[in-house]
Amino acid sequence: MFEGKSILRIIKKDKMNLYDENTYAKLNDLQFHNGIIEIKLLSRLLPDAPEFARGFIGIVFRANAGDSKFESFYLRPTNGRTCTDAVRKAHGCQYFSYPGYTFSYFREYGITKYEACADIDLNEWITLKAVIENERAEFYLNQFTNPILIVEHLKHGTGQKDAIGIFVDIGTEAFVSKLKITSTD
């Protein structure tokens, strides 16, 4: 129970202290290709979180059976509303594709079109909506009607019809109160 509600709690603590890894909780027996994923999330930093932890939370979609290939969109709540560092603030959310097209890959090559600012913070409920159609994805936050980020060419293409998961990264405690999946194919 959390705030009087039954919720799912996910902690990213001991597996590894690296970024750009396949650290997510997979929803079993679910195949997803195109459609809408809607989720309500809250993120907190663990007391022993490293300095570079950002409260990373988000979704994984089209994840293969071996967890070695997936698409993802996540939030960095500490880079949101209360962040005073302009550079960090510009990185409030991120699309990445595992393996190969990770956060570090995009940064190394100066590719910024997969990140955006996000009006979010730690310890608050955030509604995330992902609309995925073939190789295109739109990501929306909270009540906003315009997408926060649009990805025109998902890096793994259109062929995968695989699992969905909740992305949680370094030093983060995540809570999920609602999850709705609408498949369109």
Image: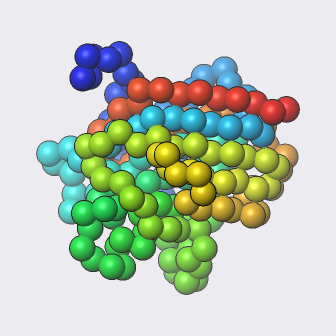
Q: Residue furthest left?
A: 47
Picture coordinates of residue 137, whole percent (x, y):
70, 53
Quick one: 121 or 31, which is closer to the camera?
A: 121
Quick one: 69 or 157, which is closer to the camera?
A: 157
Q: Residue furthest bottom?
A: 110
Picture coordinates of residue 21, whole percent (x, y):
49, 53
Please name the residue shown 56% across and 64% down the image: 102
Q: Quadrant of residue 174?
A: top left
Please name the residue shown 47% across and 26% down the image: 178
Is residue 135 toward the left or the right of residue 101 in the image?
A: right
Image quadrant where one finds the N terminus: top left
Please name the residue shown 59% across and 51% down the image: 145
Give the colour scheme of this rendering: rainbow
Image quadrant where one finds the C terminus: top right
Please name the residue shown 24% across and 73% down the image: 84
Q: Taking the image as drawn, is residue 18 in sight? A: no
Residue 21 drawn above or below residue 108 = above
Picture coordinates of residue 99, whole percent (x, y):
62, 57
Quick one: 139 or 46, which is closer to the camera?
A: 139
Q: Quadrant of residue 136?
A: bottom right
Q: Count the numbered circles shown.
A: 0
Q: Taking the image as drawn, is residue 174 in sight? A: yes
Is residue 46 toward the left or the right of residue 109 in the image?
A: left
Is residue 153 toward the left or the right of residue 145 in the image?
A: right
Q: Quadrant of residue 164?
A: top right
Picture coordinates of residue 95, whole percent (x, y):
57, 59
